[in-house]
Image (tube, rainbow, N blue to C red):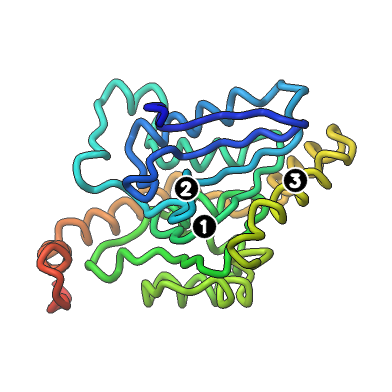
Amino acid sequence: MSEEVVLVEKKDYICTVTINRPEKRNALTVDVMYNIGDALNALKDDSDVRVVVLRGAGEKAFCAGLDLRGGIQISEGEKMEKGDPLGYARGSIIACTKPVIAMIYGNALGAGCDLAAACDIRVAADTARMGINPVKIGSIYHPGGIQGVMNVVGVAWAKELFFTGRFIDAQRAKEIGLVNHVVPEGELPATTYALAQEIAESGPLAVSATKAIFNKLLKYQEMSAEDKAEIETLRDTVVQSEDQREGMIAFIEKRKADFKGR
């Protein structure tokens, strides 16, 4: 097995970007997130690529979220160069000049669901599960990820998903618009690449321009500097709370958290 944490393969105008940590259910480290961003950014002027498929290695998981066991420490130098690693990966998917299709086996949870939502189209196996659940441990998710899910499913469903922290199955995800297609697991690659090929056969300049237009149309939702500062204060308050500590301990001890609201 390759030791590269992100694999890139190009064929017939389609580039497959694979998170290559199957033994960890493709959980995200800083290195993985930066490599995803770098891979997508490198495709900007690549005329041999018209569509990108983002997937996890193997058939057990698209991405199980952040690797909390030592995989998300970041140096100040890295952060100054590329910024927050998850934001870098998410932003690179959105800014990629080619449409990005998420091919989802198994779990797409937490940051994995976030990255899937950043893709332009999502195709899931009928065994998939999706969701983002920081509220279950008394924590709060990054506003960029909340906004990404909200852009896909709308405000009402996004609120329900983030307020409950519920993981939903593939069919429910399709019902609320979190995925475009649900197919039997054995049909996932064929369905995904048929869709990618259909897009690749369209005019590449027109497709890229159309994606750019969609991104422009969503720009009205960008936050002001004042909004960002207020959000960071809210996040700091939650992160430093007793509830946050209790939630993390309960998670480690595999028990239900006893939140006190302080």
Observer-nearest of 148 and 3: 3
Which quadrant of the structure image shows residue 205?
top right
Q: Residue at x 46, y 35 (%)?
A: 88
| Mark 1 neighbour class, 10 Å CA radius: few under 14, some 14 to 19, many 20 or more | many
Q: Residue at x 44, y 66 (%)?
A: 131
N-term mark: 1 or 3: 1
The image position of residue 65, as x and y in percent, is 37, 52
The image position of residue 218, as x and y in percent, is 66, 52
Q: Which mark is residue 218?
A: none
Q: Which mark is residue 105?
A: 1
CB atoms of marks 3 and 2 within 8 Å: no
N-term mark: 3 or 2: 2
The image position of residue 182, as x and y in percent, is 64, 67
SS at badge 3:
helix
Type of amino acid at the residue the image marks with label 2: Gly
Q: Residue at x 50, y 30 (%)?
A: 7
The image position of residue 252, as x and y in percent, is 13, 62
Is 252 positioned to the left or the right of 96 in the image? Answer: left
CB atoms of marks 1 and 2 within 8 Å: yes
Which quadrant of the structure image shows residue 71?
top left
Q: CA distance from mark 1 to mark 2?
A: 8 Å
Which quadrant of the structure image shows residue 32?
top left
Type of amino acid at the residue the image marks with label 1: Tyr
Give the position of the C terminus as an image quadrant.
Answer: bottom left
Identify the residue under disc 2: 58
Give the position of the N terminus as an image quadrant.
Answer: top left
Type of amino acid at the residue the image marks with label 3: Ala
N-term mark: 1 or 2: 2
Identify the residue under disc 3: 196
| Mark 3 neighbour class, 10 Å CA radius: few under 14, some 14 to 19, many 20 or more | many
